[in-house]
Image (cartoon, rainbow, N blue to C red):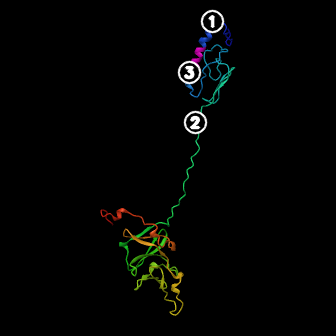
């Protein structure tokens, strides 16, 4: 009998040979399926005809199973070409399918550095007899003691006349902040109280709004001078709307201040 001669299933003897061969072939298929997890093993094989086995099996083009072929993509697809064609594709785990991205609404809130209270310096480092120039957040400040109001006051460190630093000035005998350039004097509210160059009988130029110094809201908190970095009139009473930060350790007697 030739190497590729077909075996008739009508012959009882050959039928038994075919049955034994079918069982062995089923074992081979199971072995293949266990080696390739992505393959699908059909529950029943088509019993039309089989060929004799060779001494070895070449899974790329096996003579045992005519019409069986493996895809060039490893572990992907195989088909059986017979009267009933079975084909399988890669099974896709639904849990691995890309899920639509969850849209999370992030509120775009920008921190406003100029809408907070900031400490300037502790009271123990301040001298009431002279103005003190400081820089906070890039702002030039002058801190000085207004003896008429008995309060520490924070101005923009620029005279409204020629923008000379008020921190280079002095506290006059009436307790006003006096510019060192032309001698303009200001009270704790920023009002100009004296322009030495103005004529005594002339217009009261010192009362003009352009002659006023710019005043920042300020408070004393935790034995430090704090200020609000915006001198617009709408922030004049900001202390009633937004409180300064509270640091519990500053009021705790178990802590020592250095």
Classed neighbour count for the residue bearing mark 3: other residues with Cα under 10 Å, few (<14), some (14–19), many (≥20): few
User: Would you say the residues marked 3 and 2 are in contact, meaning their CB atoms lie under 8 Å apart?
Assistant: no
Question: Does residue 161 show up?
Answer: no
Q: Nearer the viewer, residue 27 or 10?
A: 10
- Please, is residue 207 above or below residue 104 in the view? below
Q: Nearer the viewer, residue 240 or 195?
A: 240
Is 25 a magenta residue? Answer: yes
Q: Secondary structure at mark 2?
A: helix
Is 144 a magenta residue? Answer: no
Q: Residue at x 35, y 64 (%)?
A: 250
Q: Nearer the viewer, mark 3 or mark 2?
A: 2
Seen as rendered, the residue at the extreme left is 254
Seen as rendered, the residue at the extreme bottom is 201
Instruction: Tell me the CA gap for discs 3 and 2.
Output: 27 Å
Q: Secondary structure at mark 1?
A: helix
| Residue carrying label 2 | 94
Quadrant of res 11 = top right
Stretch of the chain drawn in magenta: 22-31
- Please, is residue 22 above or below residue 228 in the view? above
Question: Does residue 248 show up?
Answer: yes
| Residue carrying label 3 | 31
């Amino acid at each position: 009998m030739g190497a590729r001669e077909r075996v008739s299933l009508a012959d009882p003897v050959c039928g038994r040979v075919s049955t034994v061969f079918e069982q062995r072939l089923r074992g081979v298929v199971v072995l293949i399926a266990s080696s390739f997890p992505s393959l699908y093993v059909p529950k029943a094989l088509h019993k039309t005809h089989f060929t004799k086995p060779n001494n070895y099996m070449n899974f790329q083009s096996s003579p045992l199973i005519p019409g069986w072929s493996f895809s060039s993509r490893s572990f992907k697809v195989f088909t059986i070409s017979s009267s009933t064609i079975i084909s399988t594709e890669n099974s896709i785990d639904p849990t691995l399918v890309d899920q639509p991205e969850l849209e999370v609404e992030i509120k775009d809130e920008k921190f406003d550095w100029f809408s907070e209270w900031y400490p300037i310096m502790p009271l123990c480092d301040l001298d009431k007899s002279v103005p003190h120039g400081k820089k906070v957040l890039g702002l030039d400040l002058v801190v000085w003691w207004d003896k008429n109001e008995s309060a520490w006051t924070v101005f923009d460190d620029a005279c409204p006349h020629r923008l000379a630093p008020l921190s280079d000035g002095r506290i006059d005998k009436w307790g006003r902040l006096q510019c060192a350039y032309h001698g303009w004097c200001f009270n704790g509210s920023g009002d100009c109280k004296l322009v030495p160059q103005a004529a005594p009988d002339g217009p009261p130029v010192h009362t003009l709004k352009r002659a006023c110094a710019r005043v920042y809201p300020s408070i004393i908190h935790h034995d430090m001078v704090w200020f609000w970095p915006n001198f617009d009139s709408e922030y004049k009473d900001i202390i009633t709307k937004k409180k300064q930060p509270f640091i519990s350790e500053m009021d705790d007697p178990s802590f020592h201040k250095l």
